[in-house]
Image: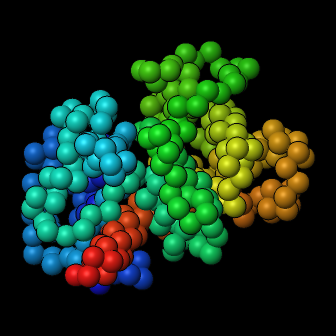
Amino acid sequence: MRIGAIEAGGTKFVCGVGNELGEIEDRIHFPTRRPEETMENVFAYFRDKRVDSIGIGSFGPVDLEPSSPTYGYVTTTPKSGWSGYNFVGTLKSVFDVSVGWDTDVNAAALGEAKWGAAQGLNSCVYYTIGTGVGVGVYTEGNLVHGLVHPEGGHILTRRHPNDDFGGNCPYHGDCLEGMAAGPALEARWKAKGDTLPEDHPAWEMEAFYIAQAISNVILTLSPKKVILGGGVMKQVQLFPIIREQVGSILNGYVSAKPIVSEIEHYIVAPTLGDNAGLCGALALGIRALGSHTTVQKLSGV
């Protein structure tokens, strides 16, 4: 198989070609600009690649309901020009292949479940904590969609006792994204996170908010692995603080061994690293190809 993959981020697009083993054979990236300019780069990249299908993990919100007239659209994003954009339809108008479609974080969760930190498990939750906060949910072998799709970056959090920052989410102020995303770190401390020393009080406060979110997801979804990616989580000193705070918040209530005595193997970085999203898009492309083949067989084609 030759599978195309698109990790469509709000800042940059990553396009690649890989195979059914999750191996990325070629890749390219370019800035996310207005749809017409960005998609022209996508078309140019795939034009001579002869792929069998293409998987897309996209920034959102997006419409994932196949029966919806706007299935495959980016919906209410503030990203200039992208709100109401028919991403899947536009791609299929140029390339006559099956297309897999999901959120970028759901794609990353799928990639980690298939080839990464959650391989062999039937559930995981993937957080990306960077310019924004996104959550992908994989459970019982399926990606969670529901009414729209998980938007765990906008859950409400308790305020840290030493934090007087008002939050910078334009919708909710002090939700998780408003308090813990990269721009919130910079606005609160007047410096970019990667310039702050490892012992700066920013990291204990950051861990305080992330640990609340993880504790909530453990209590509601009971995932078998929690994976933390994104630019903020490049600060590896966050992991032990987050694990300790999750343990304190749960306070022994969840007595499962991975949390009680093996939490360093339960709350982890993505094994696929920066390839999690692109490998996830590859997995979406493989799924789409499989679904297309099944439909053909059922219809007698």
In the picture, residue 99 is in which quadrant?
Answer: bottom left
The colour scheme used to paint the residues is rainbow
Image check: 73 left or right of 183?
A: left
Q: Position of residue 109 (x, y in %)?
A: 51, 59
Q: Position of residue 136 (x, y in %)?
A: 51, 51
Q: Residue at 51%, 74% (x, y): give it.
A: 115
Q: Residue at 65%, 34% (x, y): give it.
A: 209
Q: Residue at 15%, 44% (x, y): give it.
A: 35
Image check: 182 left or right of 253?
A: left
Foreground of the two, 219 or 243: 219
Q: Quadrant of the N terminus?
A: bottom left
Q: Position of residue 91 (x, y in %)?
A: 16, 57
Q: Residue at 79%, 62% (x, y): give it.
A: 258
Q: Position of residue 296 (x, y in %)?
A: 27, 77
Q: Quadrant of the C terminus?
A: bottom left
Q: Is residue 12 above or below residue 85?
A: below
Residue 262 in view of the camera:
yes
Foreground of the two, 200 or 167: 167
In the picture, residue 267 is in which quadrant?
Answer: bottom right
Residue 193 in view of the camera:
no
Q: Is residue 68 above or below residue 49?
A: above
